[in-house]
Image: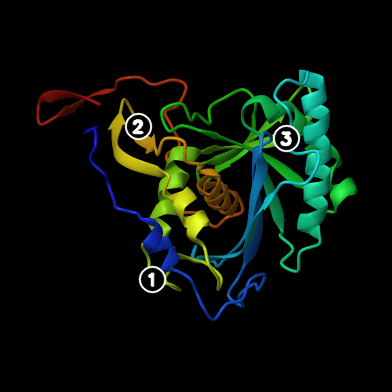
Amino acid sequence: IKEGVSVYALKPEHIIARTDHDRPPFYVPEWSRLVVAATDLNPSYAFTWGVDAFGGDQRNGVVAYGFFKDSPLPIDSKKTPAEKERLLFEALVLHGRQLAALPCRPNHWGVDAGGAQFSAVLKFSLISEKECGLKCIPMTGRAGKTYNPHVKTRVGMVRNGVYECYDKETRAKWLCFDADFYREVAHLAWLGTIGAPGSCSLFAGRHDEWAAQICAEKLNGKAEIAGRMVYNWTQTPNAPHDAGDVHTMFYALAGWNGIGTGGAASGPSKKSKTVSVVVNGKVVSR
């Protein structure tokens, strides 16, 4: 992987140019087959959320987004772990109720369950439908080099690079997805013409901050190494990229629900072996 070489040049102006000025906010297009919501959690300042409508050909349109900053956010980093978990739980309840009240009510709601908030989000998912009217789907993204669907916690089949896991401690299920792969898919969608298969567009309005956050992460290169796709992503220093994480979750949720790319890597199997075959009198290993 070459350092400092961009695979594609996605800039904020490219994203802003994909604004559909004829589509108002909260409006779900008639071609929509699936409406998903995603929330990226940063308890120290805000929850970044969005709602996206997908067509069967993977074209999609963002219909709403925002930043949830209501009390008990932000959560003081000096609080005890138990207190942080309680406050995060309460904030998720309030946020979930707001999402459920939107005119563009989503079919599925994915919530960032990475890092320190993993346990709290899993516990919240068990009561979210009762408390908010929406079922929370905890989601954890793995880098391409560590993404591996052949784990003991997996239940069921892998769908478009996304699989479901079961947590024995909380008795909750959560989704694991190839974050590097889906981040690239989400980025490339902005380079398509509005309405084209696999393209992404925004509702009418100003989207400067949203576009800047998506472009805060850049793909400098990728290569297949030892059967795994390895990506070299860099981030703009001190620049938030929460909106980009939300879009990555959009595509992973769509893939889990059958609207996929067909190209997500499944990762190497647990067991691999070399097979020797004879071709034209010569031994060939593969």
Q: Amino acid at mark 3?
A: Lys
Depth check: 275 or 145 in front?
145
Identify the residue at image location x=25%, y=26%: 286
State which mark lies toward you, 1 or 2: 1
- Which residue matches tag 1? 193
Secondary structure type for disc 2? strand
Depth check: 90 or 74 in front?
74
State which mark lies toward you, 3 or 2: 2
Q: Residue 197 appears in which quarter of the rendering?
A: bottom left
Report crowding for label 3: few under 14, some 14 to 19, many 20 or more residues within 10 A (C-alpha).
many
Depth check: 224 or 5 in front?
5
In this rendering, would 6 be left or right of 33?
left
In this rendering, would 205 be left or right of 239?
right
- The answer to the question of whether label 3 and label 2 lie on touching residues, with beta carbons closer than 8 A, is no
State which mark lies toward you, 3 or 1: 1
In this rendering, would 137 be left or right of 94?
left
Q: Is residue 134 visible?
A: no
- Sequence-first tag of 3 and 2: 3
- Which residue matches tag 3? 173
- The answer to the question of whether label 3 and label 1 lie on touching residues, with beta carbons closer than 8 A, is no
- Which residue matches tag 2? 230
